[in-house]
Amino acid sequence: MPDRRTFLSMGIAGLALAGCVRPPDMEGGAEVAKLAGALMAMGPQVDPEEAERAARVAYARTHELAIAYQITDPPLVHNTKVNMGLRPRGLCWHWADDMEARLREERFATLRLHRAIANADNAFRIDHSTVILAAAGDSLFDGMVLDPWRKGGRLTWAITRKDTDYKWVARNKVFEELARRRAGRA
């Protein structure tokens, strides 16, 4: 049976190796470039510099949050750990709140942030929150879903209308419906 020093050495070696490995999302910037291109394709009004900066920030923030949230499991397992108090954060709305806050700091002129929720009216699936980036003046349905929760700390992005995994609804509309339901029960 290995002694305490062996475990300590193995742990230090693991941390050292982990520090040497870049997250797959950031290697070579290829994924950042793809997302930037998709953001620019939303319309000629999107500033290429803003699209590149938004893509870079989205990938970097996803990586930062994965570390901060101590992501080691698939999303639903991690959710359970958060709900049991074993992890600090990492529910989908935490990711969305923290991603939105960081993107807002950029003060984009040609891009607009939206919030959306899926499955709020579905008793069989848990609801899911995300942030959506669209060209200024466009609705969330013309934007790009930025979802770091879906793959447990790896950024997933898709054009809102083509995101077949979720049917997105504007967050304020979901909140209004919930308020109506609560008022009806009172």
Image (cartoon, rainbow, N blue to C red):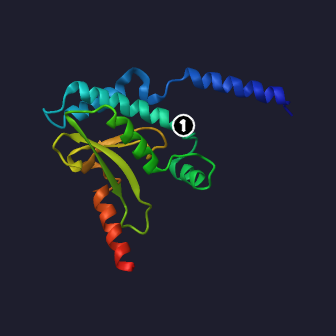
Asked whether 11 or 116 is in front, the reply is 116
Q: Outermost residue, bottom direction?
A: 185
- Find residue 179 and report its horizontal and vertical position in percent: 34, 68
* Residue in the image at 77% along x and 27% along y: 8
Q: Is residue 28 left or right of residue 86?
A: left
Asked whether 90 or 32 is in front, the reply is 90
Image height of 172 relative to 65, above or below: below
- Find residue 105 and report its horizontal and vertical position in percent: 34, 33
Mark 1 is surrounded, within 10 Å at the Cα level, by few (under 14), some (14 to 19) or many (20 or more) other residues, namely: few
Asked if one can make out residue 168 in the rendered structure from this viewpoint, the answer is no
Asked if one can make out residue 61 in the rendered structure from this viewpoint, the answer is yes
The C terminus - image quarter? bottom left
Q: Outermost residue, left direction?
A: 44
- Find residue 13 and report its horizontal and vertical position in percent: 69, 23
Residue 33: which quarter of the image?
top left
- Find residue 175 and report its horizontal and vertical position in percent: 33, 62
The N terminus - image quarter? top right
* Residue in the image at 57% along x and 39% along y: 70
* Residue in the image at 48% along x and 32% along y: 64
Residue 49: which quarter of the image?
top left
Q: Is residue 152 left or right of residue 96?
A: right
Asked whether 5 or 27 is in front, the reply is 5
Image height of 3 relative to 178, above or below: above
Mark 1, secondary structure of its residue: helix
What residue sits right under mark 1 in the picture?
Answer: 68
Residue 47: which quarter of the image?
top left
Q: Amino acid at mark 1?
A: Ala
Q: Is residue 115 left or right of residue 16?
A: left
